[in-house]
Image (cartoon, rainbow, N blue to C red):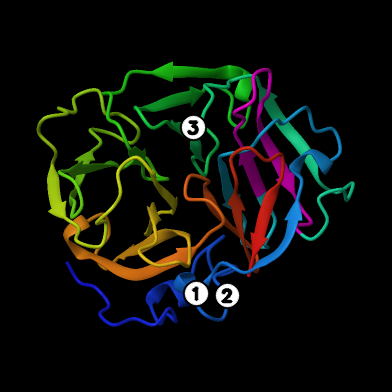
């Protein structure tokens, strides 16, 4: 595995020059991903006109357009709360009437649930600590039409945003831990019905994940992997950040360092010029810089 050695937190990587719709508008900050973590403000998705009750928000995901507008999806860990898809035209002011709610539904498995949504609005993934759940949305972007589809039960796992593969962290032993990343390729996008939990398609030891597993894994973008990890110093919690130097090949993952976060179990998402971080037990998000 390729990695950066002796890194001081600043970052020079392909991630800083991402091209393509929804990625060039990034929000990686001048210091790069590993230097992120300074709190700019808190924002409340419930301020969007027409928002239902959101409850505590542990999971967030964004689908961005080339013009910088996009969709924000949030999970709820509160009983009676909602998963919501917001249309965001103005990221600076969620209360602006140009923002709106696309759909919502009381799908609330509880706990620290990360989430992702396909660019076409037809598939949704909930990442729980014990397993993943994949849903087909028979009407794109309409959460009330979500139907759960079969999936092998894998703890501490996530699915790539395009549905092409699934990742799982496996941690053995005690400190020092031995942490391995497993990958299963989809038979067809979002179809893992033939996957064998005991036989991943690819397996790679990841030394940087020395104290991980239960703190979760996510892919906010197709070429970016973030794993929750407790820092080894007094600086607190963080998200270990990796990018693919070859698409979908976990043996080519490049380590960029640890992004400082307020909590290790909340999810990270990117929007134009900003990084958003969810914090379990809060009804608002942190905007970082």
Q: Residues within 10 Å of mark 3 (few under 14, many from 20)?
A: many
| Range of residues picked out in magenta | 71-91
Instruction: Classify 14 as above or below 131.
Output: below
Element type where label 3 sits in the image: strand
Q: Nearer the viewer, mark 3 or mark 2?
A: 2
Seen in the picture, residue 88 relative to 260 is either above or below; the reply is above
Question: Residue visible at 78% across and 28% down?
Answer: 52
Q: Is residue 85 magenta?
A: yes
* Sooner in the amino-acid sequence: mark 1 or mark 2: 2
Say whether marks 3 and 1 touch (CB < 8 Å): no
Q: Position of residue 289 (x, y in %)?
A: 63, 70
Which mark is drawn over residue 259? none
Q: Nearer the viewer, mark 1 or mark 2?
A: 1
- Front residue of this view, candidates 43 and 94: 43
Q: Are marks 1 and 2 in contact (CB under 8 Å)?
A: yes
x, y (%) of residue 252? 20, 64
Q: What crowding class fits label 1: few (fewer than 14 Cα within 10 Å), some (14-19), or many (20 or more)?
A: many
Whether residue 18 is visible to the viewer of this picture, yes or no, is: no
Task: Please tell me which of labels 3 and 1 falls first in the chain.
Answer: 1
Vertical position of residue 105 compared to residue 183: above or below:
above
- The image quarter containing residue 149 is top left
- Local packing at callout 2 (Cα closer than 10 Å; few below 14, some 14-19, many 20+) is some
Q: Is residue 126 magenta?
A: no
> Mark 1 highlights which residue?
35
């Amino acid at each position: 595995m390729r990695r950066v050695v002796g890194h001081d937190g600043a970052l020079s990587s392909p991630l800083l020059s991402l091209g393509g719709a929804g990625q060039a508008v990034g929000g990686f900050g001048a210091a790069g991903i590993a230097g992120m973590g300074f709190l700019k403000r808190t924002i409340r998705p419930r301020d969007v006109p027409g928002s239902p009750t959101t409850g505590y928000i542990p999971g967030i995901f964004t689908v961005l357009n080339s013009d910088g507008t996009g969709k924000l999806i949030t999970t709820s860990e509160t009983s009676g709360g909602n998963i919501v898809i917001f249309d965001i035209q103005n990221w600076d002011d969620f209360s602006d009437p140009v923002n709106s709610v696309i759909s919502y539904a009381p799908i609330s498995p509880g706990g620290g649930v990360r989430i992702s949504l396909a660019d076409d609005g037809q598939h949704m993934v909930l990442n729980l600590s014990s397993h993943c759940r994949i849903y087909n949305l028979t009407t794109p972007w309409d959460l009330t039409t979500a139907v759960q589809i079969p999936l092998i039960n894998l703890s501490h796992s996530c699915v790539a945003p395009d549905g092409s593969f699934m990742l799982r962290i496996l941690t053995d032993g005690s400190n020092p831990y031995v942490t391995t990343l497993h990958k299963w390729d989809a038979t067809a996008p979002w179809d893992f019905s033939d996957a064998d939990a005991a036989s991943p398609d690819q397996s790679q030891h990841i030394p940087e994940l020395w104290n991980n597993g239960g703190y979760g894994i996510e892919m906010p973008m197709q070429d970016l992997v973030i794993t929750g990890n407790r820092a080894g110093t007094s600086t607190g919690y963080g998200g270990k950040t990796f990018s693919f130097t070859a698409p979908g090949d976990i043996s080519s993952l490049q380590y960029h360092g640890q992004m400082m976060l307020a909590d290790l179990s909340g999810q990270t998402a990117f929007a134009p010029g900003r990084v958003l971080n969810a914090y379990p037990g809060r009804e608002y998000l942190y905007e970082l810089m």
